[in-house]
Amino acid sequence: MKTLRTAFHNRLTVAGGVVVAILIVVAVAAPMLAPYDYAELDAARVLEAPSPAHILGTDGLGRDVLSRMIYGARVSLLVGFVSAGLASVIGVALGAVAGYFGGRVDTLIMRLVDVMLCFPTFFLILAVIAYLDSSIWNIMVVIGVTSWMGVCRLVRAEFLALKKRDFMVAAEGLGVRPLWIILRHGLPNAMAPVFVAFILGVAGAILTESSLSFLGIGVQPPDPSWGNMLTEGKATIEVAWWLSVFPGCAILLTVLGYNLLGEGLRDVLDPRLRNR
Amino acid sequence: MSTLLQIDGLRTVFDTSEGEAVAVDGLELSIAQGETVGIVGESGCGKSVTALSVMRLIQSPPGRIAAGRILFEGRDLLALNEKQMRSVRGNEIAMVFQEPMTSLNPVFPVGAQVGEALRIHRGLGRAEAEREAVRMLKLVEIPEAAARARDYPHQLSGGMRQRVMIAMALSCEPKLLIADEPTTALDVTIQAQVLDLLGALKERIGMAVMLITHDLGVVAEQAERVIVMYAGRVVEEGPVDRVLASPVHPYTRGLLASQPALGQEHGELKTIPGMVPRLTELPAGCRFRDRCDRAEPRCSSTDPALTDCGPAHRAACIVTTEEES
């Protein structure tokens, strides 16, 4: 409760939290909130400016921009959470093993992290997607598999410190198996930074997915994503600004929201940064 | 009484940037079934490292057991693989750590932690282990045990937490309990309670206790035999009353002289001059000679061996053991 109260003290954190909450509600309730079907064509109302009938206007095929953006929020949410979730699971598993066991295992895993960090991740993703189908699931897996290194380092550092704590040694003294010590005694005490890294990871994954979709190798039309909406809008930006501005703002606000929430939670969960 | 634990020539070293630090050097020690043995000595003399060596919990690297045998009921613990060793830890040999404030996991209720060893070694289910944990908490005289079992460590006082630690250690009725300064972090009245409890439980379970402490008063009350360690070696061992009444080794004498006695408030407290030698550069000959008031030139050349100086009483000093015999 105290944690929550501290969090509410920071207006920016609250703002980020509100943005994230709204996005989640919009994504979940998309079919109820969208005024039109996101794929419904209307040849009579092509490139219509925002009006009471189409609040955010229509695109080059006469589809309602607002409805497409609402469904686009689903893609963002899904990609963000699944990718960041996958990255967290990989990062936590490898980081915990590296930090707890140390020695050669640690060296091996940390060099793997170094190698992964050396790759220009975005081009790696491009290359992989070029070979695989550009389905949303492939995208999520690829983003997840290329973004776990930060979490891995964090968790390793936590475990290096935890390993020396008396209760970890005491658990070993009771004959507890190493895997069980890691899962039951270590992880619950190392989750705070992971949680923050997860939230920040969601923002990163959303941005990556938008970039991929913008380049045409992410979510494929007619399925809407904010990234591919931007692509469609860029050809007609001089006559129909609303096609680019609204999805662009959506991406900006979303990433900003997750980042503010993540940073705010970091301040709350890390006592060293408190009361600054 | 038959021997439960027999340590032969144990040598535990730590690799440091300044070379090999020998924390325990050729230690000989035995504990009989049901016996309480006190191990005393200054900080850094190898008491805790001995305990951790028996549990095979020396952090490696930097530490390692370089030589020796640790026979527990005739089995060499150093020859066991990690899996076999896990079935010994917490089950046949259990340990109570020094710091009750940090030795419990902050994110779990204490009942679950007490039950953990039972689930591992006895294969009990969650509910059964929880019931058994409450029984153990009652055994260590925690009031309202069922309610306390659901408390988290931070909700309990230091004395209560140390009782929880003892309950954890005793849950599988070990044959040997290693208590590493179990009362150092507690205040004096609680110390006495915890020690009395430990003594009573020892009788009840019939286990042997290796009691590590620097408090000779604790040893006098609890232990049957005492082992005095200095710089990784045993310098004197024998029955408690004998060693405390007529110590032979100058170090033991120094330790006893530096204990404050009640009603003896006048005068300065005696101390032993100097410090334990650096473990990376141990002197040849007697390791205590630089601080010893009885040192003679021959002490720097002869490595003193444990020599009989009374019934079951041995000391490692070439000067004073000559006088005794």
Image (cartoon, helix red, strand yellow):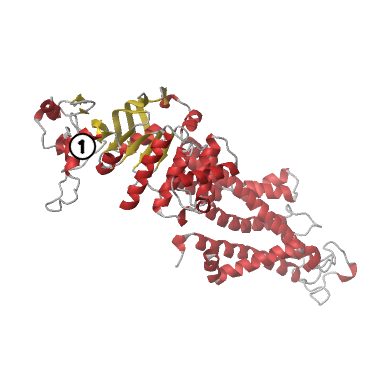
Residue A161's x, y, as percent? 44, 48
Q: Residue furthest top?
A: B74
How many C-alpha atoms fall within 10 Å of the one at disc 1: few (<14), some, or many (≥20)?
some
Q: Residue at x 54, y 52 (%)?
A: A191
Residue B252's x, y, as percent? 19, 37
Residue B136's x, y, as percent? 48, 43
Foreground: B154 or B164?
Answer: B164
| Left or right: B11 as drawn, with respect to A20 | left
Foreground: A214 or B84?
Answer: B84
| Left or right: A259 as drawn, with respect to B248 | right
Residue A80's x, y, as percent? 66, 56
**Is disc 1 placed on a helix, strand or loop?**
helix
Q: Residue furthest bottom?
A: A52
Q: Which residue is mark 1?
A: B244
Q: Amino acid under label 1?
A: Leu
| Left or right: B322 as drawn, with respect to B238 | left
Q: Is residue B200 above or below residue B285?
A: below
Q: Is residue A175 above or below residue A81?
A: above
Q: Is residue A36 above or below residue B12?
A: below
Q: Residue at x 39, y 43 (%)?
A: B97
Q: Quadrant of the N terminus of chain B?
A: top left
Q: Residue furthest right?
A: A44
| Left or right: A72 as drawn, with respect to B102 | right
Q: Quadrant of the C terminus of chain B?
A: top left
Q: Residue at x 31, y 39 (%)?
A: B222
Label 1 lies in what chain? B
Name the image quarter holding residue B256.
top left
Total labels drawn = 1
**Residue A95 visible in the displayed image:** no
**Residue B10 visible in the displayed image:** yes
Name the image quarter holding residue A245.
bottom right
Name the image quarter holding residue A25.
bottom right
